Image (cartoon, rainbow, N blue to C red):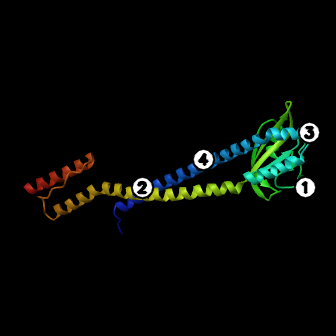
Amino acid sequence: MDQRRLLWYLFPSYLIITIIALVAATLYAYYLLSINYIEVISSDLKGKAQIVENQVREHLVVSSYAEMDSVFNLLFEKTDTRFTLILPGGQVVADSEKDPSQMDNHRNRPEVTDALQGIVGTSIRYSKTLDTELIYLALPVYHQKIIVGILRTSVPLFLIEETLAKFQTRFIIAGLIIAMVIGILSLYISRRIIKPLEDMQFGVEKFAKGELSYRLDEPSSKEMGRLTAALNQMAAQLDEK
């Protein structure tokens, strides 16, 4: 039966445990980063909506939607953000990317449903209109404490995924570097643990050959030190006989 050195039992064990812990920590960190980044994007969408909220309110009150369509188109060119204006009944009256008259009723869209209840609505879902996934934010627009419309902003999810992919690449590179460092440290620690045992093995082989005057160096650990002292004492007693 082939016998492996103790080093090749200890080193892989340390390495595997540390790599598993590293992978778990990296995945969790990436998960937290993804959530935080989506929150940042949502906050940005809300900020953009609030910038034009007063202007939108003025046009909603007088039912002047055509001009808002032009404003939304200009905003889209400058910010790469889609702007949509929706009436409380769900009818789309202005949109920066599509003809509102060709768009479905939006009353049952999750973010619009939330906004109609007086809260800022957010959702990440597939858009049939644009044939892609988007992150949406819907802001209720009030006039005299009554919701007169919903101002919605959105950006394609793939833009967020592209940014996160860059972070993911950096995480992987950093993880590989850390794994290499951990591997070297694991090997170093394993060798430090095994070195006293190898020294004792060498000494015992000397004793077995009759070289009883040989003495083992005392290692730093208390347990190994006691064992080394016992072996040296045994050799000394045998040498006296």
Q: Amino acid at mark 2?
A: Tyr
Q: Position of residue 75 (x, y in %)?
A: 77, 50
Crowd band around label 1 with a 10 angstrom C-alpha radius: few (<14), some (14–19), many (20+): few
Compared to residue 122, the image places residue 241 above or below, namely below
For this view, does 180 lie left or right of residue 106?
A: left
For this view, does 155 lie left or right of residue 226?
A: right
Q: Nearer the viewer, residue 15 or 2?
A: 15
Q: Amino acid at mark 4?
A: Leu
Q: Earlier in the sequence, mark 2 or mark 1?
A: 2
Label 1: which residue? 102
Q: Earlier in the sequence, mark 4 or mark 2?
A: 2
Residue 70 visible, this angle: yes
Q: Position of residue 88 (x, y in %)?
A: 88, 40
Q: Earlier in the sequence, mark 3 or mark 4?
A: 4
Instruction: Give the alpha-carbon distance from disc 3 to disc 2, as whole Å.
Output: 71 Å
Q: Earlier in the sequence, mark 1 or mark 4?
A: 4
